[in-house]
Amino acid sequence: MMIRDPRPVFEQVESGFKIAGILVVVCAALWVLVSYLPIYRIEAWVWHWKHGNSIQVGEFTVPVPNEWGVKRFDVGGGTQVVQLVNTKGRKPFWATITITEEPWRRNIVLADFATSRRRMMENLGIHVTDTRQLVIDGIAGFCLDGETAMTGTPIRNISCDLGTSLSMEYIGSSRTAPSFYSILDGISKASKG
């Protein structure tokens, strides 16, 4: 049995409008709150909770600091691409590291490859400021450290290649570049087994 509301229709409608108004305000507040949540940081935290603090790329284990998010792409042909994105510090600290494992690229002459890579970077407007030798578990490589400007903002571009199939590219703020080099120092050959 249904009980009839004894209030006049006008008061019932007015009450309904009040409830609708409250719902609109609550929904608007939730929308504003969700739009300001750092979703990318939450995604990074979830990735680290599931996978730990490293990722295997080809025959190498790459450390991933907690403030870096991870996206893995399968581009076909056996090539693996992993992208690390810095989620800490907002715009002044933005950075992306792209790690590529190309199994078809073996037995390259490092000096020739470094010259070719330097020429390519300079053709893209990147001023190479430093060249570093790199050795990871006995495998020689190199890093070309350069700078460019994107819409007036200075950008650091670091390109590293091992003599095997692994390459890493850093693009981002100079403030976050030391973090890239510490990731690079932590790379090791993955244990078999």
Image (cartoon, grey):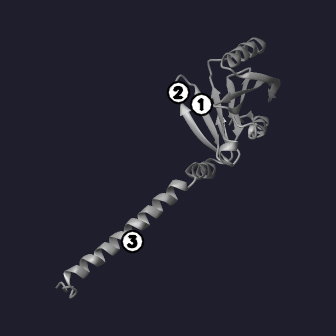
Q: Which mark is residue 22?
A: 3
Q: How many marks?
A: 3
Q: Say what secondary structure mark 3 lies in.
A: helix
The kind of residue tagged 1 is Val
Q: Which residue is mark 2?
A: 75
Instruction: Mark 3 or mark 1: name the one nearer the start of the chain.
Output: 3
Q: Is residue 92 above or below residue 128?
A: below
The kind of residue tagged 3 is Ile
- For label 1, the crowd category at 10 Å Cα-Cα, with few meaning under 14, some 14 to 19 and many 20 or more, is many
Q: Is residue 87 above or below residue 77?
A: below
Instruction: Mark 1 or mark 2: name the one nearer the start of the chain.
Output: 2
Question: 4 left or right of 134?
Answer: left
Residue at position x 42%, y 63% in the image: 27
Q: Is residue 120 above or below residue 96?
A: above
Give coordinates of residue 53: x percent, y percent.
69, 46
Q: Nearer the viewer, residue 158 or 6?
A: 6
Q: Which residue is mark 1?
A: 81
Give coordinates of residue 17: x percent, y percent.
30, 72
The kind of residue tagged 2 is Val
Quarter of the rendering occupied by the N terminus:
bottom left
Instruction: Verify CB contact (< 8 Å) between mark 1 and mark 2.
Output: yes
Question: 177 left or right of 84?
Answer: right
